[in-house]
Image: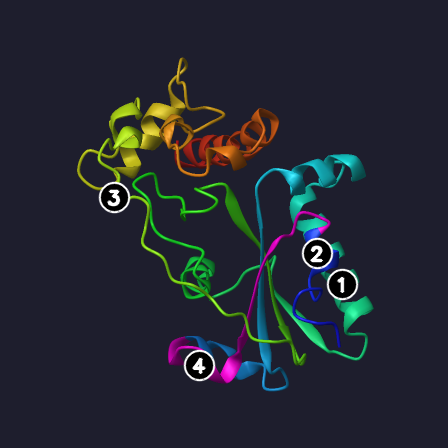
Amino acid sequence: MPTTASAFDDLNAQGLNLQAVFNIGDLPQNIKDTLQAYPHYRQLILIGHAGPLLWQKINKEGMADEHPIDSFSQKHVSAWLATRHPQARYHYLYPGPTSIGLQSLGALAGWHHPSPFMVGINQTWGSWFAYRALVLADTDLPITLTTQSASPCTSCASRICVKSCPANAMQEGFNLNACLSYRRQTNSLCKDRCIARNSCPVGEEHRYSEAQISYHYGRSMTMIAKIGDERK
């Protein structure tokens, strides 16, 4: 079996550079209850990406698929399992519908703190990371040792994200209706980005490219417009 240092090299090279391995028996009871339908697996593997490398790799392979990030992630996670753990059985919980909260697992892994703009944040990567795969496996990988750190938002005196939000959607908690209403406006500054998120200085050296930011928020804007049309 590969050493801890090299266990995820294949994934790191593709920009899938966040990994956390949990023994199912050590997870909180509510998560274990959800996994009772899958008794043959010992471990739960959470895989994410941080920074811009994943986007660069996906663009090299092409964006023809309807869900290129999911397809890319699943392809390379499956290849990693086949190469490193050829005898292991595995099952994807994500991509796909899952009843396990990815953000809750991210918090267990030490990756995730809530932010005023409703995207996970941490001291290292800021908000420039995301969850890409969740896999049950009968592997025997070393359990990830996580370091819990304080939220960078706790010590932020400027509250620059709150002040910069053009929708004033974060004055008292998060006002989803105000956010969506502003994004739908013809001259909205947030159609293909979140101004509040972009204003946050934490982890700014890992910020996604403009093309990646535009892609993600463009897709969300398409969903928002579709929901609005269905309600008319």
- Residue drawn at (39%, 25%) of the image: 195
Q: Residues within 10 Å of mark 3 (few under 14, many from 20)?
A: few
- Residue drawn at (39%, 81%) of the image: 29
Q: Position of residue 8 (x, y in %)?
A: 69, 62
From the image, state whether disc 1 or disc 4 is nearer to you: 1
Q: Of the two numbered discs 2 and 3 on the same chain, state the one appearing first in sequence.
A: 2
Amino acid beneath label 4? Asp
Q: Of the two numbered discs 3 and 1 on the same chain, state the one appearing first in sequence.
A: 1
Amino acid beneath label 1? Trp
How much space separates mark 2 and mark 3, taking CA atoms? 33 Å
From the image, state whether disc 4 or disc 2 is nearer to you: 2
Q: Is residue 67 visible?
A: no
User: Where is residue 159, by image quadrant?
Assistant: top left
Q: Of the two numbered discs 1 and 4 on the same chain, state the one appearing first in sequence.
A: 4
**Residue receiving disc 4:** 33
Q: Of the two numbered discs 4 and 2 on the same chain, state the one appearing first in sequence.
A: 2
Per the rendered image, the range of residues in magenta is: 13-30
How much space separates mark 1 and mark 4, taking CA atoms? 28 Å
Looking at the image, residue 164 sits to the left or right of residue 184; the answer is: left
Q: Who is closer to the viewer here, 95 or 77?
A: 77
- Residue drawn at (30%, 22%) of the image: 166
Q: Tag 1's secondary structure? A: helix
**Residue receiving disc 1:** 80
Q: Residues within 10 Å of mark 2 (few under 14, many from 20)?
A: many
**Residue receiving disc 2:** 11
**Residue receiving disc 3:** 155
Q: Tag 2's secondary structure? A: helix
Q: Tag 4's secondary structure? A: helix
